[in-house]
């Protein structure tokens, strides 16, 4: 059973108890009823347990982490292969090749955002 916070309207006392989700009011010590308060999240670092055996958690910014990893993989592994398949013009337009300060042609090994 989940733990809920209840608050009395007459005396203002708050109490936390384990109850079934269907329970919305309980008796207070002053004789009136205590109402269940809405659930509060304690912070912005909310995680969801994905694998309880290995204690792996899913973070809110997991999608951004996966996007960065896929970009890193693309520039480290796929770009060298794609340079051999496509023409110089296409590689320069896509940003896979670039000219450095000395005017030499270089292969981009990191995403342009990280350089």
Image (cartoon, rainbow, N blue to C red):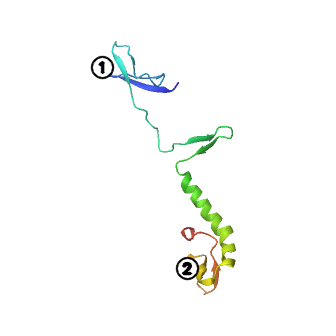
Check disc 2 and report its element: helix, strand or loop.
Answer: helix
**Label total for image:** 2
Location of residue 90 in the rendering, given as x and y in whole percent from the top left corner: 59, 80
Percent coordinates x, y for residue 49 in the rendering? 59, 40
Q: Earlier along the polypeptide chain: callout 2 or callout 1?
A: 1
Above or below, comparing residue 73 to residue 20 in the picture: below
Q: Mark 1 points at which residue?
A: 10
Q: Toward which corner of the image does residue 92 lie, by quadrant?
A: bottom right
Residue 3 sits above or below residue 62 on the image: above
Instruction: Return the x and y of residue 11 as percentages of the image width and height.
Output: 32, 19
Q: Which residue lies furthest to the bottom in this view?
A: 103
Q: Name the residue under label 2.
A: 93
Q: Which of 111 and 42 is in front in this view?
A: 111
In the displayed structure, 44 sits above or below 98; it is above
**What number is the disc on residue 27?**
none
Q: How far apart are marks 2 and 1 (CA)?
A: 71 Å
Specify whether 106 is left or right of 32: right
Q: Residue at x 51, y 26 (%)?
A: 2
Q: Determine which quarter of the picture holds residue 69.
A: bottom right
């Amino acid at each position: 059973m989940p733990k809920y916070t209840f608050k009395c309207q007459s005396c203002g006392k708050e109490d936390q108890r384990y109850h079934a989700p269907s329970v919305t009011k309980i008796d207070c010590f002053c004789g009136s009823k205590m109402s269940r308060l809405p659930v509060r999240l304690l912070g912005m670092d909310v995680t969801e347990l994905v694998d309880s055996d290995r204690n792996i958690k899913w973070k809110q910014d997991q999608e951004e982490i996966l996007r960065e990893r896929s970009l890193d993989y693309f520039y480290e592994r796929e770009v060298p292969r794609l340079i051999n398949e496509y023409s110089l013009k296409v590689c320069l337009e896509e940003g896979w090749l670039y000219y450095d300060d000395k005017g030499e042609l270089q292969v981009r090994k990191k995403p342009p955002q990280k350089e």
